[in-house]
Amino acid sequence: MITVALAKGALLKDSVERFAHAGLDFSAVLEEDNRQLMVPSACGSARALLVRNGDVPVYVAYGQAQLGIVGYDVLREHQMPVAQLLDLEFGGCRLALAVKENSGYKSAADLPPHCRVASKFTHCARAFFNNLDIPVELVHLTGSVELGPITGIAEAIVDLVATGRTLQENGLVAIEDLFQSTARLVGNPLSLRLDQGSLHTIVEAMRQPQSSK
Amino acid sequence: MITVALAKGALLKDSVERFAHAGLDFSAVLEEDNRQLMVPSACGSARALLVRNGDVPVYVAYGQAQLGIVGYDVLREHQMPVAQLLDLEFGGCRLALAVKENSGYKSAADLPPHCRVASKFTHCARAFFNNLDIPVELVHLTGSVELGPITGIAEAIVDLVATGRTLQENGLVAIEDLFQSTARLVGNPLSLRLDQGSLHTIVEAMRQPQSSK
């Protein structure tokens, strides 16, 4: 039985649609009254685990799911040993450095040395500032990072930006991008190596361009 | 201006009620259509930051909030430098070790050596197993930890238990408690030391037993 890990939230609808191209119908997870976290496919030959974003690579890395769909941002932050198989090109966003509109900072280099930067993505932020040799103090927050500059807990934030509306509503502006992110199909390396064709068939079916639907 | 950090979710209603005893009316945060994360008190002399559970001790430790209300479980897991002022005695739950009902394990010592244990509270779990000198591999999950034993990613879980319903629904049973948790009033140590009386007055008003309302 093939198990796939799907992330709850913004990526779910498109993830279900892409697996449908490979003949795996997990549309039951989209039903509003679904409370199950482990959902069989319509054909019964596979099942989906409905988990948080950050847990997708964990289930795939440990082999409890052979495949999973998760944002590149999560893969960069958590660095779990999973194979990246496909860029599915939905769920586009970017990880950006943002500051108060009226701060006058135009780039990371303008930030005062040893200032505080709040983020959910502290590993990515650490790597970014280390590469630039800019010393900052990172403050790990788990939500509503846009509150950081408003409350004064941080001079800047590193956060995901999709439409930019949250930044705008909070008087913030993005000044540098760390990287672009889209949804990725990932796989368990050992499962892929031992695969007798079934995983390969799914991956190939999902590789087809959208226009061939 | 006094700023207090309130945790979104299960503790919010009681937290607002307890601050009301001290004359700070934050009931606006309970309104269903409230989207603001920074909410002034009705009297205008204070404001509340509405943040995630785990971020309450961060805002208090950095002094962006002088006071906050958060579960003891979060304080134990995150170990931020905040002063614990009061046990507010609501939001009761326990951090427990749980296994599959049919596993036959009756205590932590029964677990197979080097088995995997899934938890959101990996620091607390690490300390617990270290104290017992039981070697386990901890798997950090960010949600739905009860899926752990069902999917086979872990033999056991360490998770918060309030009513026990989630465990029961998933065929799990708690076999040991790590500790009991309730909501705590916490304060920024420096703000408390420099306090000219206003914080002290609030803390004292919140200390009053519920019966004196």
Image: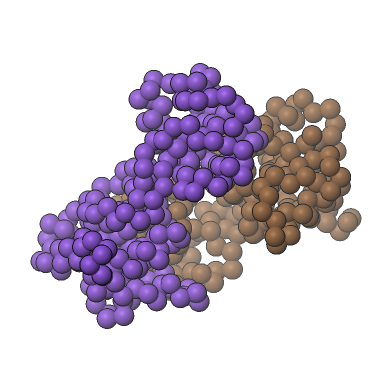
Chain colours: A purple, B brown
Which residue is pictured at 59% across the width and 68% down the height?
B163
Which residue is pictured at 64% across the width and 50% down the height?
B7
Residue projecting furthest to the left:
A196
B91 left or right of A159?
right
B116 left or right of A104?
left
B64 left or right of A43?
right
B143 left or right of B23?
left
Quarter of the figure that contains the N terminus of chain B: top right
Residue projecting furthest to the right:
B212
The image shows residue B173, relative to residue B16, as above or below, that is: below
In the rendered image, residue A28, in percent from the top left (x then y), is placed at 39, 76
Residue projecting furthest to the bottom:
A43
Name the quadrant containing residue A197.
bottom left
Q: Closer to the camera, B96 or A63?
A: A63
In the rendered image, residue A35, in percent from the top left (x then y), is placed at 48, 73
Residue B110 visible at all: no
Residue A164 visible at all: yes
In the rendered image, residue B156, in percent from the top left (x then y), is placed at 39, 61
Q: Closer to the camera, A80 or A206?
A: A206
Which residue is pictured at 40% across the width and 63% down the height?
A12
Which residue is pictured at 44% across the width and 32% down the height?
A176
The image shows residue B87, relative to residue A32, as above or below, that is: above
In the rendered image, residue B153, in percent from the top left (x then y), is placed at 32, 60
